[in-house]
Structures are given as structure tokens and as C-alpha cells.
Image (cartoon, grey):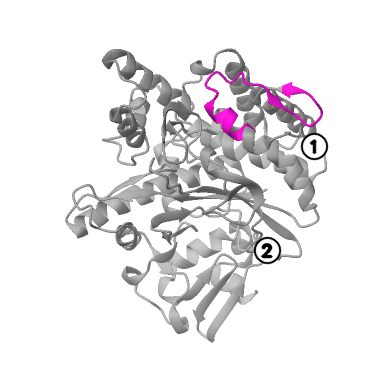
Amino acid sequence: MLLGAETEYGILAPKRPELHPTVLSAAVVDAYAGPGTLARPDQGDPVPVEDAHNRFLGNGARLYVDHAHPEYSTPEVTGPRAALLADLAGDAIVARAAVAAGERLGTPVRVFKNNTDGKGASYGYHENYLLSRATPWERIVEGFLAFVVTRLVFTGAGRVGLGQSSGAPGFQLSQRADFFEAITGLETTTRRPLVNTRDEPHADPRRWRRLHVIAGDANRSETATLLKLGTASAVLAAIDAGALRPPMLADPLGAVRTVSRDLTCTAPLELTDGRRLTAVAIQQEYRSQVQAAGSADAEIVDVWGSTLDRLASEPLGCAELDWVAKLNLMESFRRRDGLDWAHPRLAQLDLAWADLDDRASPYAALVRAGRMPRLTTDAEVERAVVEPPDDTRAHLRGRLVAERTSDVLGIDWSWILLQTRSGRRRLRLDDPFDGAADAVAHAGGLDAFIAGL
């Protein structure tokens, strides 16, 4: 299955609060030092990289300004581990660009991988999965809805405050749960739905549909990110294959808030068949069916199962998950200093967790102390920062951007306008697997592959 993710990062300049987030976001995009080209230059003419606020990068990804946030879209990949690496590469790229932007502006710029400012604004972490057009939309909604609601037990990033504006004190599993107001719909910034109906496949629409998932948190934990992307792609593969008989929630919108506020993971949720199961038990049903369908690799099935078993018996022992690690850290501060949940220091700690500056983030400190496990190496992440995936069209896109930047006159996910010796050519890449490394090598290199398109 083809998958990827988009992260909208929170941003601020603490010493220059008058600088608008849009200005800061543009500065971050412009300051990234890696190879890149403007997505849609006017008249098809080349535009200098330093003038671009919407860039495709040499690793096949896209970095741009969206809704006053710097946003990073990973390249298309074919598996959850590759998606995890692509996600972490985005964090590294944006963190480095923020440092460079701060140097240009003469003031530090901070970026945060979170989903709310705690004052009523929410910004997204969106997942994308490419599915067969032959799969009925109704089957996707029915199969995915209870899964996306109950997966908060391992995907929640943790949040101080209850309600969209944090009007009530407390702690909950998810940063995003309070912002969903519809079951299905097209919106992403108002009346957000649990299942988004946007269908822009960026590929041949006769063969593919793209499920745009907005009901997810931006995680720092590598385990949570791998589980989020790996379990979702496995469930969707089982839906695609017609091999899933999903549990159905009686009240999905009510359930997402119940799950987010249930720090014990024991609250029963009512199903349409009359059963009352916990979120963990519903996830165990999904895992069992996915395992029987053979739609996930062994690593995902094993990590999913062991995590659910521990959540069922001792959820606060799952310290590799964001919400658990964050809650344990905050409870230690609360006990030591006698803080209630309304104390501003806890909200500051919540924000600091998401800070991409490793010197300021408690998450990074726990990683250094060996208390938050790494599933990747620095070398693997660095490779994903500079190299595109080998097995999708992102390979061709990234190589052209990195090696022939001045020849790329226009670019999007499914096409590239290229200056060649014989004139301008628009390369159509409606098959997301066109331009993979093997195909380019088999053709005899970039020029030969392009000539054959």
C-alpha cells in the first residue's frame, strides 16, 4: 500500500511576538538549505529557490506554507517503516530550517510538532493512504471508523486541558479529539470529520482513491508513529481485500471524547450490536482480523499485540507512547511541587514536549536517557533527509529536483514540467510506481527513462 503523512507545525518567535506566523512559516520554507524547486512557477518559468514558499525537495517530499504553518508532506512510500523514516526526516528538515530562518531574521524561531495552541486553534497531522477505486466508499467508512476512534489508546500525543479552548483542567490522551464535530465530511478546519471525504488521488482516478485521514495526532514517539501508520495501512488493506468484519460504534463522536479522557483505558463503548467493549478490546478485534487476513507484516502485528496487552493490564507502563510518557512526567511534577492541572507550568511542559529543538524538549531528554526507545538510527533518518524512496515515483521526482534543479520548470505529485534538449516536456506520472529506481536503472538512467515516457 502507498502511504504518506503531512505535518503542520506550530511556530512562534518568542522574542518577536509581532511577527505573524505566516511570515515565520515562509522564512522557514525559504531557509531550508537542501535542493528544492517551486511547485508551480508562473508561466512555467524557473523561479529562484529563495523566492519559493511551496517547494518540492530532493528527497521527494514537499515543504510549504499552509494556513500560517510550515507544512511538510512526506514522499510516497510503500511501508510503515519507510513512512516512519520519512516522517522523522520532515522533523529534521523543519528543525534545521527554523534555525536558519532565525539566523536570517535575527531572532530565534521555534517549531512544535503538536496539534493545538491550547486556546481554541487546532492544526493537523494528516495521513494519506492510496486505495483501490474498486473498493466501495461505504465499506471504507464502516471498516475504518471504529478503528480510528479507538486507536487513540496508542496514537494519542497527550494533552493538558479539556475542551477546544482548554476551558476545563485535566489531561487527556489526544490533542485532536475535542475538535471533531462530524462523522464524515470534506472540511479540515471547521466541523472536522472523523472520516474525511476528500478524494484527490494525485494518480489515475480510475484506478486509485486517496483516503485523507485527519483524525490523528502528531507524535514524537517513534513507536506511536510506527503503530499509527502501520496499523492503519493494515486495516485499510484488509478493507480493500474485503476481509474485515468491523465492530460498529453506536456513537462515534461521543466515543472519541470518552476514549481521549479515559486514562485507565477501561471505559466501555456501546456498539450497534449491543455489546459494550473498551477501546483496547475493539483494537484487539481489529488486530485479530488483520492477522487472519495477512494484511500486515509480522513486526506491526507483534508490536500492536504486545502494546494492546499491556494497555489492558497496566496502561501507565506503556512509557514508549507519547501520552503515557508525558502523563508520567507531569504526575511527577505534580507530586513534587503540589501542582493542580490548571497550573500554567504543566501547559508549558506540554508545549515543550513538542519542541523540535532537542535542547528544550523533555521528549528528547528522555530519548537521551534511554527512557523513550528509538526504532531508527540517525544514519537512517539522515538518508531519508537527502535521498528519495527507491520504490515509488518519488525517486524520479527527487532525483530531478536534486540533480537537474534548473531544468524543472514546474512540478506536482503526478507531473513534472521539464526542460529537455528538444524543448519542454510534461512528464505524466499517473501511476505512483512510475519512476522507481529499478525502472530508471533498467532504462539506462534518467535521460533514457524520460525519453521513454
Q: Report the Cα–Cα distance between label 1 and label 2.
A: 27 Å
Look at the image and tell me in which quarter the C terminus lies.
Answer: bottom right
The residue closer to the viewer here, 91 or 123, is 123
- Residue under the point 63% across and 47% down: 182
Quick one: label 1, few (<14), some, or many (20+) residues within 10 Å?
A: many
In the image, 372: left or right of 396? Answer: left
> Which residue, given by chain and number where applicable, does mark 2 sit on?
431
Query: In the rendered image, which quarter is residue 147 located in?
Result: top right
User: What amino acid type is highlighted by mark number 2?
Assistant: Asp
The residue closer to the viewer here, 235 or 8, is 8
Seen in the picture, residue 374 relative to 74 is either above or below; the reply is above
Q: Earlier in the sequence, mark 1 or mark 2?
A: 1
Residue 226 x, y percent position in the rendering: 55, 36
User: What amino acid type is highlighted by mark number 1?
Assistant: Leu
Seen in the picture, residue 16 relative to 225 is either above or below; the reply is below
The residue furthest front is 167
Residue 173 x, y percent position in the rendering: 50, 29
> Which residue, given by chain and number where applicable, does mark 1 sit on?
244
Q: Is disc 1 placed on a helix, strand or loop? A: loop
In the image, 391: left or right of 141? Answer: left
Seen in the picture, residue 3 relative to 67 is either above or below; the reply is above
- Residue under the point 21% across and 49% down: 108
The residue closer to the viewer here, 345 or 93, is 345
Q: Is disc 2 placed on a helix, strand or loop? A: loop
- Residue 264 part of the magenta segment: yes
Residue 201 x, y percent position in the rendering: 65, 61
In the image, 349: left or right of 191? Answer: left
Quick one: label 2, few (<14), some, or many (20+) residues within 10 Å?
A: some
The residue furthest bottom is 422
Instruction: Please tell me the numbered disc located at residue 114.
Output: none
Magenta segment: 255-276
